[in-house]
Image: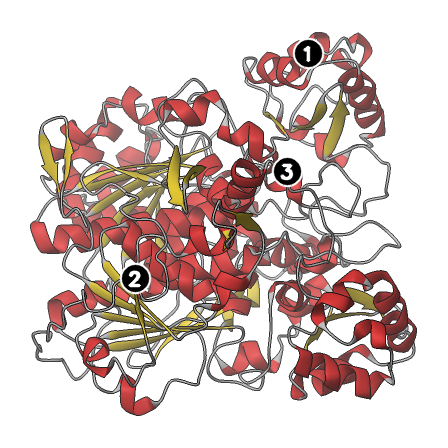
Amino acid sequence: MQDNIISGGRVLTKAFQGIRVIDLSDRLSGAYAARMFGDFGADVILIEDIQGHPLRHEPPFMNSESGKPESLLHSYVNWNKRSVSGTVEDHGSLIAGADVIVTTSTGIPDTVLQRSPDSVHLSITPHGLEGPLADFPGNNLTTCARVGWSAINRYVDEPPLQLPLHQTGYISGVAGFVGAAAALFRSGSSGHGERVDVSEMEAMANTCAPWAELGLFIGGNRMAHGPNGKRDRGRAGPLWKTQNGAINFGYGDWAFWEEAMNFLDLPELAKDPDFIPVLGRNQKDTRPVRDGLEEAAAQRDKWELFHGLVQRRCIAGVVQNAQELIENEHLRSREYIISTQISDRRIRAPGAPAKLSATPWTLNRPAPEIGQHDGNVETTPRKRRTSSDNPDLPLNNIRVLAFTQAWAGTFATQLLGLLGADVIQIESCKRPDVWRGAGAPVPPAVRNPDIEQNPLNNNGMYNTVNLNKRAITLDMATPRGREMFWRMIPKFDVLADNFSPHVMGNWGITLETLREHKKDIIFASVSGYGSTGPLAEYPANGATTEPMAGLSSIHGYPGEIAQNTGGLIPDPISGYYFAAAILAALNHRQRTGEGQRIDAAMIEAVAVQLGDAMLEYDGNSHLRTPSGNHHPRIAPHNVYQAKGDSWLAIAAETDEAFSSLAQLAGIRDERFATMALRKTNESSLDEAIGAWVSDVDADAMAAELCSLGVAAARVEPFEEIYHEPSPQFVARGFLQPITHPESGTHYMPMVPWVFQNTSRGHITHAPCFGQHSREVFEEELGVGSAEYRELEELGITGTERLR
């Protein structure tokens, strides 16, 4: 494997160069987490028995000239690894020399893992290693049911939907990488080992929780169906059909309303005074708008609509499928599309989820054959280090200055804050974070006539993704505000933003100017399309990125062309990958003293989640389309209506699991004797299970099925999950009661992992607007009371919004 990269005559090292990772996983999440270490330079050793990693047997498959089917999922998730054959007992010495060990089951003997006590042990399981669900099976279908995605992914009177295939595995994998990379960072300075116990359920809960919290702040179960509300089949929005596909119109945020409506040949709507102001537009009856957009879109080309609107600074996003992603001009210009060797062919795939200037993501080797590297993997004992008795949180000494807002960037910096970093969030009095709900009143369910409440401090979304942060206001449009910023920079390790690419440059902020003040700083930015390429300055958000990145093209009920998910999932996906890139850069800086630039694009982070679908197109010329709750190999794998209005997700992933299910349900039919037969006769099988489930209690039956080894879960009502947490969430401390001085006490989600040797530490509520301005400016710049009052009078800082 190439140790260094040559770029522009400069030798670039790799973030995890010299780190050895042992992959003992048997499911997607762990395999993907291990691969991410390999993508950033670690030596990843996959230990496999004679049958090989289970992903080798998962579709889609590509037939090579030799006639041997190759799993494209395996080819995607297990590249950048070496393979040795045997059991964990056979390779005890390899495990003893590991820096990171990745597992996804509890079947690994403790005696094996204890051979490397100062390593990082990353465990990723469906529900975590502790709590009442710890031993229960789970997968994408049941996890979506437990955390709320299924409840908000549906049409009225139709079955709730899982997220597209493999999303839980990929998202939990990057979440696991973040936790393990943080633990490895601490190990680099303290020598302290750690077990990082990741719950797939918690990793996924973080991707939709803010909407439920918003609903709890509003009251009246307003978010029961997610931010898109109730959706009827056939009703236009959030996707509209065009002549040649579909498009998302983010009309609720269009500031240039009249220009957009005239471009769409809707002159009456252009002049409608109810819709011209952005503020309050979404609270109006928008049916005339949706109907007008439906008529306009049907007569136009999707790309004409996209460019015409976005060039007018009105956000939109077309649905792209795997073929269009591979051929996309913007992605090609950013060298995002790469190729990997699969048997005798080169197949195109997505590349880096973020661009790092000093330690770029690289594809070094294709997925290995079983035992391909037997005899070629040296056993190198690790240098043992002295461990501290009371380890701090991993990022305890790291400081982050953040111009992040809304969701993607704030979620990433919250992860850093919950890992111990001192995160200071910068807003301005004229431009509060949009997720503070500027202009909206205090939500009904948190109104308290006995105290003074600022609407900016009482938004459920903002308060969910800004824990463990301090908030300041600073007007960067003024020379004095910029002067204060530059004086603060030398005291920070990371500068993060999620503005449009030109904004930081307009303030004179580049990696070069930052290095004049802080040589080893990490400057990290995330935006819709990244800082380069023909779409770089186009505005975007989660609703437009979802179709642009291809996720909408594989989500929905069978037979649909596409569907957006119920909750803008590109933001938290991008947040996880943004945090991952920052952790990779911090690990590199710890070893070399070198900072760097991170350029992350939401479209690229989300498209990474479609890697196997892109391989499937380029390898088999097959375009993946929405498949509802079905799985390409497993049957049954569906959501069935139970007693009352409840629904039950059931997946029998093995013959043994189906045997238990069939015995309980009284199903005896030779058509269902094997997995292949069950898949062939899936419609009949679904009918039989559906008839049985219709008369059972979903909660009780889910528990009974899980005890028999069948993955099952009730589809939980969305807001209820976060208002009355399950014992599993409480047992692991994932949902904790956080008291805000204005909003009161609510259960808020934490990080999706538990460190065995480190407590979560003290959790602080989301900060009030400008809450820490005086404190931070005094600490960092020595600003006294008189000077602070002057800054307030000038509008450079403060705790009230300026219009």
Does residue 43 lie above or below 309 as drawn?
A: below
- Is residue 769 visible in this depiction of the protein? no
Residue to which mark 2 is pinned: 372
Q: Quadrant of residue 695?
A: bottom right
Q: Quadrant of residue 266?
A: top right
Q: Position of residue 47 (x, y in %)?
A: 33, 71
Q: Position of residue 108 (x, y in %)?
A: 38, 84
Does residue 387 lie above or below 417 as drawn?
A: below
Q: Circles 2 and 1: CB distance less than 8 Å? A: no
- Is residue 247 visible in this depiction of the protein? yes
Q: State how the image is colored.
A: secondary structure
Which of the two labelled residues, at mark 2 and mark 1, occupies the earlier sequence position?
A: 1
| Residue type marked 1 | Glu
Which of the two labelled residues, at mark 3 and mark 1, occupies the earlier sequence position?
A: 1
C-alpha gap between disc 2 and disc 3: 31 Å
Residue to which mark 3 is pinned: 623
Q: Nearer the viewer, residue 23 or 174?
A: 23
Q: Nearer the viewer, mark 2 or mark 3?
A: 2
